[in-house]
Structures are given as C-alpha cells and as structure tokens.
Amino acid sequence: MKTALVTGSAGFIGSFLCQRLLDDGFRVIGVDAMTDYYDVKLKERRQQRLLQNEHFRAINDFIEKPGLMMELFASETPDVVVHLAAQAGVRYSIDNPRAYLESNICGTFEILEAARTHPPEHLLMASTSSVFGANTHMPYRETDKADHQMSFYAATKKATENMAHSYAYLFGLPVTMFRFFTVYGPWGRPDMAPIKFTKAILENKPIDVYNHGDMKRDFTYVEDLVEGIRGLIDAVPVRPEDGVVEEGDSLSPVAPWRVVNIGNSECVQLTRFI
C-alpha cells in the first residue's frame, strides 16, 4: 500500500483529494492547521468523514512549524506528497500579509527541505491562476509569462513555483505545480463566490456583483479538479536529457519540474453563472 501525504487535508479541495486517494487504495496522512480563516466546524466535519477510513491519519498542526515536516517525512516515508495547504484569499492578503509569508513561503520551504532529505517519488504543489496577474492573454497557457502579480497572495504562490523549480534543479526532485482557477462544489469554502451567491439567493438577498457582472471566470467542479490531480500523480516529470522541450510543453529544460493549469477550459460570464 502506497502512502500519500496531503497538506491542507481538511480544506475544500484537500478533503476531496484525500477521499479519492483512499478510494484508490492509498494510505493517507493528512496535515491541516484548522485555522479560523473560515468556519472551523466545516473543516472538522470534512476531517471526521475522512477519519471513518482506517487508512487515514490526521495531524492538526502548522506546516511552517520548524521540523514538523522533516519528522513526518522521516517517519512516514510518503511515496507521494500533495502540498495544498496555504493561506488563501486575495483580499485578505491586503490586511494580513504576514499570514501569507508564514504559511505559503515558510511552509513550502519546510516541505521542500523535508522532500530533499527524504525524497518522495513525486511532489505535487498547488499554485493559482492569480499568478498570471497583469497578463491579459486569454486563455491562459502554462507557457505564458507570469511576471507581474497583482496581489501579495499571488506573489507568494509564484514564489513557491520558483522555490520548487530551484529544488528540482539542484536536487533532482520531481515536482509538478498545478494552477487552480475558480473551484466550486459541495463542502465548498463559504468565502468563495458560488457559496456566497447561493446563500444570498436562498435568503432572498441582493448579490454583490462588481463591474456589472461584465467578467468571466473559469469555474471548475471540485471532483473534476481532483481527477486532474490524480492523473498528474502518475505523470512524474523527467528532466529532458538534451534540454529540448516540445513546443507548448511547460516542462523545464533543466529540471524535472512542470506546471499545469487545471481548469474547465471554458470561461463563463458571471451573470450567466448566477
């Protein structure tokens, strides 16, 4: 039985991924700090569902805690690591930037150091479509430039992509980054638009829509997203021997590192979605 370590396991996406891995016969170690960014009870209920499976172990602690990840990697020797834990939210990062520095940057550093010392077969890490920032080219492609982030949240996620690439190059650590778009589905985060819109409709309250709804979003159903991650787990990147990468491939020419967009592939007008 293979072991998967999943950070952010009590989160919206993390809980669905853990369940999928358990269904596929993995032993799963889930790490989650259970922060109060939104209702902790929702996270607890997600975790309780996972704990019904004897092959799931929950660890409620902060990934940025020095030595925690190193200890877990040494004792559990995970075959696969999926790093989803992060301080999320674009607007929240304006008033609380330190939370993003500690969780996203320092937490990712702890993961990378543990993976360098106790290498898994494959390390997968979550990024975000927000890294594209000022890039107006649509649809986004993995090979498009992502140099001008427009929020501190996006800046920290772009930094984790670069950190992971450096470890892949220096230590031959196979890493796949995946960029999420707008994810929706059951057990979703209450601060995300789909849940907020639904709640307002059910309570017969007005919906706050910016720019007159004249915007588009790539809404991705959570189980479709998890299906994409599951497929990527088995697609371990390999450094190209001659440094030549096929056109359109986001594989690094110098490291076993690749970035993949996981979305619906079709943007939907916000007013239509509502």
Image (cartoon, grey):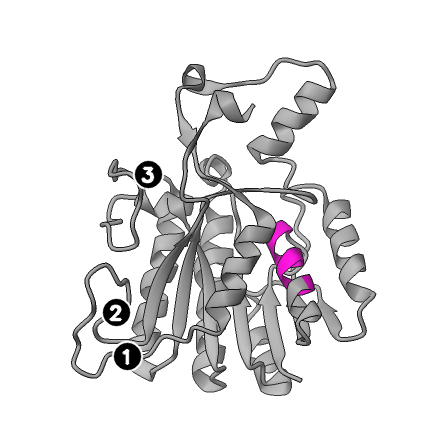
Residue 9 image point, x, y percent: 65, 61
Secondary structure, magenta segment, majority class: helix
Residue 64 image point, x, y percent: 54, 65
Q: Decide if residue 202 is on the left or right side of residue 110.
A: right
Q: Secondary structure at mark 1?
A: loop
**First along the sequence among labels 2 and 1:** 1
Which residue is rendered at x = 72% and y = 51% of the image?
A: 43
What is the span of residues highlighted in magenta in the rendered image?
12-19
Residue with the mark numbered 3 = 150
Query: Gap in Å between the C-alphas at discs 3 and 1?
Result: 31 Å
Mark 2 and mark 1 in contact? Answer it, CB < 8 Å: yes
Q: Decide if residue 199 is on the left or right side of residue 273.
A: right
Q: Decide if residue 111 is on the left or right side of residue 148.
A: right
151 and 188: which is toward the camera = 188
Residue 28 image point, x, y percent: 67, 73
**First along the sequence among labels 3 and 1:** 3
Q: Decide if residue 79 is on the left or right side of residue 51.
A: left
Q: Disc 1 residue type?
A: Arg
